């Protein structure tokens, strides 16, 4: 039986483990966004979110969709594009200060150990942050990294730095955009929602454009893995449809691996790269348009 057929009959709750033992530190210590005057790292995190929350408007996102969905920025294979993230440190991440390519292999390898039969899930772990390549093409990190949220409606209470960082966002003064529903309708579905622009949405669109063979579950994980106000905070469920709520369990499963694998331990990339190349060849071979 092919993996793609198997996925459709799996209940993701059967895959969720009650305790994940691989975290590099206590779970409660992850995603601590406390800013201290003498903590340069956390001051950088706060500034990244402040810029993001003040500039991510409906008009801004529309402009980025128009720019990046031309898919004429560059052409490249998956693993060679991933190699460029050797030179990217995510300025929104409070947990680690390591190249993003390391995090990609950490996530993928733990998924591979826990779910050896779901090779599409291993590849999803490897490429989930690959949209951050935009940072090398004149996009500021606040438009690339960090938690995502819908634009065009009021901001959810669980958004990081919610009450400190949206003060200069003009959409907050627009009565058509600053209500709970905003420019949407109840239970319209996440695919009808315009998300803040970042690596999640971009990578999802890259995969769609290049006709990836990854299953829908993988695409949901990639598109919404940074949507913490939804899959952790519980906000925005009034905009979700039945399909979104069914897929939520898959996103939550993936989140545990995206978050708790972060550590200073670096995988032996040279030895495992051939395996991941075989997955690329299976699900998204050749040169992609970005």
Image (cartoon, helix red, strand yellow):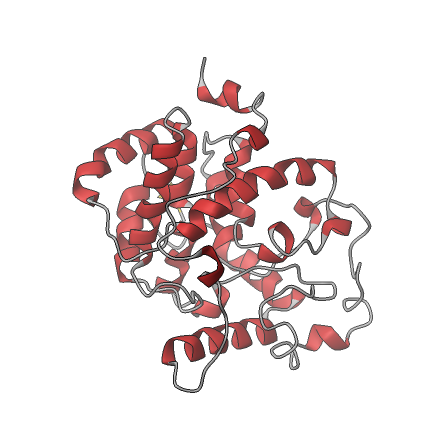
| 105 to the left or right of 187 | left
Q: Quadrant of residue 251?
A: top right
Q: Is residue 56 visible?
A: yes
For this view, does 205 lie left or right of residue 109? right
For the point 24% across and 51% down, the residue is 266
Depicted 11 relative to depicted 126: above or below:
above
| Extreme residue toward the bottom, this view | 37
Question: Percent position (x, y) of residue 141?
Answer: 43, 68
Farthest-out residue, left? 270
Q: Residue at x 57, y 23 (%)?
A: 8
Regarding residue 76, the answer to whether it shows in the image is no
Question: Residue at 62% across / 57% down in the picture?
Answer: 195
Task: Tell me if 282 is positioned left or right of 12 in this view.
Answer: left
Residue 38: horizontal and vertical position, in percent?
39, 86
Above or below, 275 relative to 24: above
Q: Nearer the viewer, residue 101 or 59?
A: 101
Residue 167 at x, y percent in the picture: 66, 81
């Amino acid at each position: 039986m092919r993996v793609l057929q198997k996925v459709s009959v799996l209940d993701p709750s059967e895959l969720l483990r009650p305790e994940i033992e691989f975290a590099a530190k206590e779970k409660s210590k992850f995603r601590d966004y406390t800013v201290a005057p003498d903590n340069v790292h956390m001051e950088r995190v706060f500034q990244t979110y402040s810029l993001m929350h003040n500039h991510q408007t409906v008009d801004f996102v529309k402009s980025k969709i128009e720019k990046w969905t031309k898919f004429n920025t560059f052409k490249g294979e998956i693993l060679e594009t991933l190699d460029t993230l050797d030179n990217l440190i995510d300025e929104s991440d409070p947990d680690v200060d390591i190249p993003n390519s390391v995090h990609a292999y950490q996530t993928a390898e733990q998924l591979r150990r826990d779910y050896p039969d779901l090779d599409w899930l291993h590849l999803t772990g490897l490429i989930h942050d690959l949209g951050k390549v935009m940072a090398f093409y004149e996009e500021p990190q606040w438009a690339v990294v960090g938690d995502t949220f819908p634009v065009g409606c009021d901001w959810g209470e669980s958004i990081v730095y919610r009450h400190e960082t949206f003060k200069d966002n003009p959409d907050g003064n627009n009565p058509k955009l600053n209500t709970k529903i905003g420019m949407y309708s109840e239970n319209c579905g996440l695919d009808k929602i315009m998300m803040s622009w970042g690596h999640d949405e971009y990578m999802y669109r890259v995969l769609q454009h290049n006709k990836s063979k990854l299953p829908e579950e993988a695409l949901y994980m990639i598109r919404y893995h940074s949507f913490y106000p939804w899959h952790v905070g519980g906000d925005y469920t009034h905009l979700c449809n039945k399909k979104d709520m069914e897929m939520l369990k898959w996103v939550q499963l993936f989140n545990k691996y995206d978050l708790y694998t972060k550590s200073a331990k670096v995988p032996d990339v040279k030895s495992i790269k051939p395996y991941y190349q075989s997955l690329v060849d299976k699900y998204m071979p050749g040169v992609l348009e970005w």
